[in-house]
Amino acid sequence: MIQKVLIANRGEIAVRVMRSCKEMGIRTVAVFSEADRAARHVMYADEACLIGPAASKESYLNIDNIIKAAKLHHADAIHPGYGFLSENADFARRCKQEGIIFIGPAAETMEAMGDKIAARKRMIAAGVPVVPGTEQPLQSAEEAVRICNEIGYPVMLKASMGGGGKGMRLIHSEDEVVEAYNTARSESMSSFGDDTVYLEKFVEEPHHIEFQILGDNHGNVIHLFDRECSVQRRNQKIVEESPSPFLTPELRKEMGEKAVAAAKAVNYSGAGTIEFLVDKNRRFYFLEMNTRLQVEHPITEEVVGVDLVKEQLRIANGDVLHLKQEDLYQRGHAIECRICAEDTENNFMPSPGIIRQLTEPNGIGVRIDSYVYEGYEIPIYYDPMIGKLIVWATTRQYAIERMRRVLYEYKITGLKTNLSYLKRIMHVPDFVKGEYNTLFIAKNARMLLRSNGNNEEIENIAMIASYIDYLMNLEENKSTQLTDARPISRWREFGLQKGVLRI
């Protein structure tokens, strides 16, 4: 039985994994870099271990140091979270060699599905539809030009070992092929240490829809339905929801069956995701498999009622999957917004800094997976996502209304965030009607990036005036000449009339 787990990650996912461990009576070990000494996951864990300097390659990507930490603290297992080493087959293999349980699939499975070209071949053999494209790595820019002309434009050039939008280039004409080929190879090499690329026919007006799957070590595989992940900027997801407003019940059932077939084709064990592209005519194609927990897993947990981390732990412990496909169903609707420390008006540049004030929303159907607190300094070294805001409601309309309310309540000062940007997404007609695809951000860019308008300016001025009033009251209460000192409001002097603040 697993008694102690080391979480080889940081931030909100480390805290989230620890919470499930704590409920199961499993002790946790946090690892941290020099930049994360004061991080919440370090304080929340039962034990903690420094593994290196701030740079990821010297800490969170340092396999030797993580293994040493696990042995030093006598951890039975390692949970990789997502990102960093979560899909690194060498790491999974090293854990096995050292007698440490890796909470995830086998190294061989990662290699089979991590290589996009190999994965395409396996899916074709399993009867899972794939996007038309190459089945072998491209050998030259000249070959890329020839195949693009054969497939027909637009075409998507992809890194075989890619993920997170890296190493991807959309090609509209022959003139773009050579530059896209060279750039994608270079980016892939710098990001993944591999410059293998391939081509796929670009699916126009696609929906990015993924199915959550669970498999045990006894041959059992189930799916936990779908997530719509089409609100993306530069191939990075921003807002996700479940269930997808685009799928019909019949299509959902068929895609779920194909997702299970895909997982069984590689003897999958653990939590994973089968990602599909669905075109405007509702034809679907296998995109890739993520052999780890996804950032957006909470919305599945909310609508299906299953703790995915606990299931990961039970599977890693050798238990038979206790969930049956026929017993699972989607209840209500959930939406997730990714909260990032970034300047949306300056090309979404990361905005590290100290959080001066933090007000998190709450109420029925509200969940926050985060790791920040007032006074915490967000480091410059890692991903700018600081948390996830998840809401659940009985219908999609009610979920949108709830998300609008909680985004309004969410206040973070001291640095720039994307909260206002997310608020605007919740009011765009295409999103509200559920009639959107992966072109949503580009189509509505002007509306999403416009100034916040008078209402938000009035709110900011009101907050400033309120703080001035507070300071004035402090001064009055310091006066030794007043025997009956008490706060005196200045609001009447400022005057709020018809929604306009007068100063």
Image: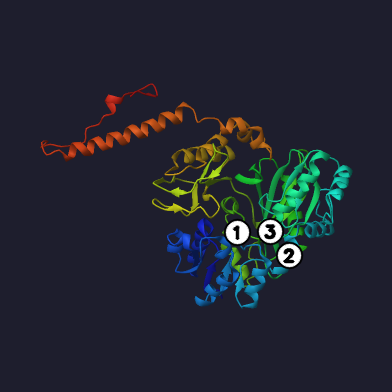
Q: Residues within 10 Å of mark 1 (few under 14, many from 20)?
A: some
Q: Nearer the viewer, residue 389 or 41?
A: 41
Residue shown at the point (41%, 28%) measured from the top left: 458
Q: Residue 233, image x and y in percent?
A: 63, 42
Task: Give, as a three-letter code, the residue at label 2.
Answer: Glu
Disc number at residue 111? 2
| Nearest to N terminus: mark 3 or mark 1 | 1
Q: Residues within 10 Å of mark 3 (few under 14, many from 20)?
A: some
| Nearest to N terminus: mark 3 or mark 2 | 2
Q: Residue 219, image x and y in percent?
A: 72, 68
Q: In terms of secondary structure, where does tag 2 sit?
A: helix
Q: Which residue is mark 1?
A: 82
Q: Nearer the viewer, residue 362 or 408?
A: 408
Q: Nearer the viewer, residue 292 or 392?
A: 292
137 left or right of 499 in image:
right
Task: Give, as a three-letter code, the residue at label 3.
Answer: Phe
265 left or right of 307 in image:
right
Residue situated furthest top in the rendering: 498
Q: Quadrant of residue 413?
A: top left
Q: Residue 122, image x and y in percent?
A: 81, 60
265 left or right of 416 in image:
right
Residue shown at the point (76%, 58%) measured from the top left: 262
Task: Give, as a three-letter code, the residue at label 1.
Answer: Tyr
> How much space separates mark 3 and mark 1, taking CA atoms?
15 Å
Residue shown at the point (89%, 44%) measured from the top left: 150
Residue shown at the point (21%, 36%) measured from the top left: 487
Residue 65 appears in the picture as rendered: yes
Q: Residue 495, image x and y in percent?
A: 31, 24
Q: Which residue is mark 3?
A: 192
